[in-house]
Amino acid sequence: MAVISYLTTVWFDFGAVDRLGEALDQLAIRRPLLVSDRGVEAAGILDRIRARIPKTVVVASFLDTPANPTEAAARRALELFRAEGCDGIVAVGGGSPIDLAKAAGLMSTHPGPLRDYALIEGGLARIRPTLPPLVAIPTTAGTGSEVGRGSVIVLEDGRKLALVSPHLIPRLAICDPELTLGLPPALTAGTGMDALAHCIETFLSPAINPPADAIALDGLARAAAHIERATHEGSDRRARWEMMMAALEGAMAFQKGLGAVHAMSHPLGALPGKPLHHGTSNAVILPTVLAFNADHVGDKYERIRRVAGLRPGADLSEWIRGLNRRLGLPGSLRAMGVVEADLEGLPERAERDHCNATNPRPATAADYARLYREALG
């Protein structure tokens, strides 16, 4: 089993989750709040998780994480955390439960509404290293939130914003690819494309961070080579291992910053009554943004082509569109249920999103209006 210390400690391999009791002991967690969602529960994964927790440990469970985590849900989790006298958190699931767990942990030691801690509101400097210990156990290979310093939450005012701080990084990530073996094809594809988008956007970010670039390219190589097999041959253990590593590397690298894909996807995730899957939104938007950025990336597209096994000069936008088709993903935002009326106000929110600052080509609200229309289809 690999034990990786980069940003945090990661236990990575098939069977890693069997050491959960050891993890709780190391972090002196005796009364954890288990944060997950009903889908993870229905898949039987929580039964396996609970079976690895020593009987001397008292567990409280919050399982009502929305598809796009909200401040209201984080408050409900916080109420349970306090009522049960919890001293740590175990988050099990995709990015939504892990992000919600981070937000609840933050609220347990920091006063006021979450907007005070949003990155674009100056919240980075307000987050102190006083959060309860968090163990993150991903059940998808996509967001990489298990090693990420961010938590993306739909606030009470309707904005979907990022809370960002190194203090939000989980104390320990337990990455067991076996937990992804039963993931349905559509969810495998959507989360996998989220990981691939992370690797591409991080590499294209103009910030100078060669180690992050190297990690991003390695993650991209793994995702490009294995995402189709993981989707269509879900029991393939090698493909599942590689995709979980790609997701981990995408998040390790995006400490460097993301770009316009995520700047556009975050506001979409806050649309009321439309729980759009974040990774699928990224997959649909990515071709449009790749075309928009093409003249502002130097030789980086050619390096992406080499890593992804494409011919020189291949159209990256068409590559992603073809990959989306082969994975069975929607071809447009309209196919995801988005209509023209939903776009009102989104370009301005995308321009203000923290990911916009690290897109290789400066983008205005007018640019985002055009990009949304193109992605709408």
Image (spheres, grey):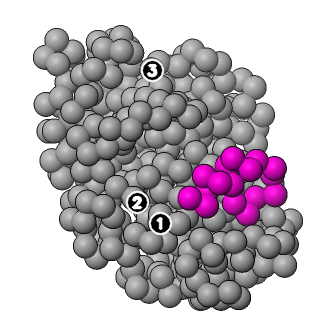
Q: Quadrant of the C terminus?
A: bottom right
Of residues 174 and 374, the one nearer the viewer is 174
Q: Where 193 falls versus 110 (above or below)?
A: below
What secondary structure is marked by label 1? helix
State yes or no: residue 342 in magenta.
no
Find residue 189 and name its label. none
> Is 218 drawn above or below residue 32 in the view shown?
below
Query: Disc 3 vs disc 1: Cβ atoms closer than 8 Å?
Result: no
Which of the two labelled residues, at mark 2 and mark 1, occupies the earlier sequence position? 1
Asked if labels 1 and 2 touch by Cβ distance under 8 angstroms, the answer is yes
Which quarter of the picture shows residue 180?
bottom left
Indicate the quadrant where residue 199 lies. bottom right
How many labels sit on residues?
3
Q: Where residue 357 appears, x then y in whole percent? A: 81, 54
What span is colored magenta in the figure? 203-218
Which disc number belongs to residue 133? 3
Circle 1 residue: 223
Q: Give the Cα separation between the discs numbered 2 and 3.
A: 27 Å
Q: Label 2 belongs to which residue?
A: 243
Q: Please, what is the three-letter code of the amino acid marked with disc 2?
A: Met
